[in-house]
Amino acid sequence: MTTRERALKEKLTPAQGAFGEGRHFFPIRVYYEDTDFSGIVYHANYLRFIERARTELLREKDIHQGDIHAGEKLFFVVARMNLDFLRPARMDDLLTVETKPVKIGAAILELDQTVRRDDETLFTARVFIAAVAGGKARRLPREIREKLGF
């Protein structure tokens, strides 16, 4: 690898989003692969968008799912979702996924997630994430609860 290639590679970073106003904001660009034949985002891809945003929220809080899986054998699984598809997103749109914590229970995280294009709300989800180990619900470890700090 040349010096120039190395310098360019060091500038590349994955989109992480940012915290503000009590929520996490994560940018998503709509690509051709996200759309159906008409250029509108396929409905299941909204779930992928909000999953990415939740993962980056955890990373921003220094919670790395790979480490948790390997060390404590703790997994986060979606227990329930309530979804509303309000308006379509289209190819090339720049969207923002907003993730707002609602509640931390003993083993459940409750989050509101909204996908917006500028000020227009396209999709909303109330997401219930369960902490699971050994196939059973497990209390969230104190360290993770503290890092989440909602």
Image (cartoon, helix red, strand yellow):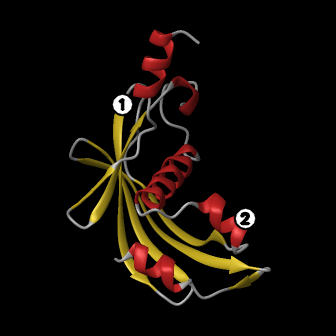
> In the picture shown, does residue 104 fall above or below 19?
below
Element under label 1?
loop
Q: Which residue is mark 2?
A: 70
Q: Amino acid at mark 2?
A: Ala
Quadrant containing the N terminus is: top right
Residue 21 horizontal/vertical position (percent) = 20, 63
Q: Relative to 23, is 35 on the left or the right?
A: right
Q: Relative to 89, is 131 on the left or the right?
A: right
Question: In which quarter of the view is residue 28 placed?
Answer: top left
Element under label 2?
helix
**Residue at (45%, 31%) from the top-left corner?**
30
| Local crowd size for mark 1, using a 10 Å CA cut-off: few (<14), some (14–19), many (≥20) | some
> In the picture shown, does residue 47 fall above or below 10?
below
**Residue at (36%, 77%) from the top-left corner?**
149
Residue 127 horizontal/vertical position (percent) = 49, 69
Say whether disc 1 or disc 2 marks the residue closer to the N-terminus.
2
Q: Which residue is mark 1?
A: 93
Q: Does residue 36 appear in the picture of this structure?
A: no
Q: Does residue 19 appear in the picture of this structure?
A: yes
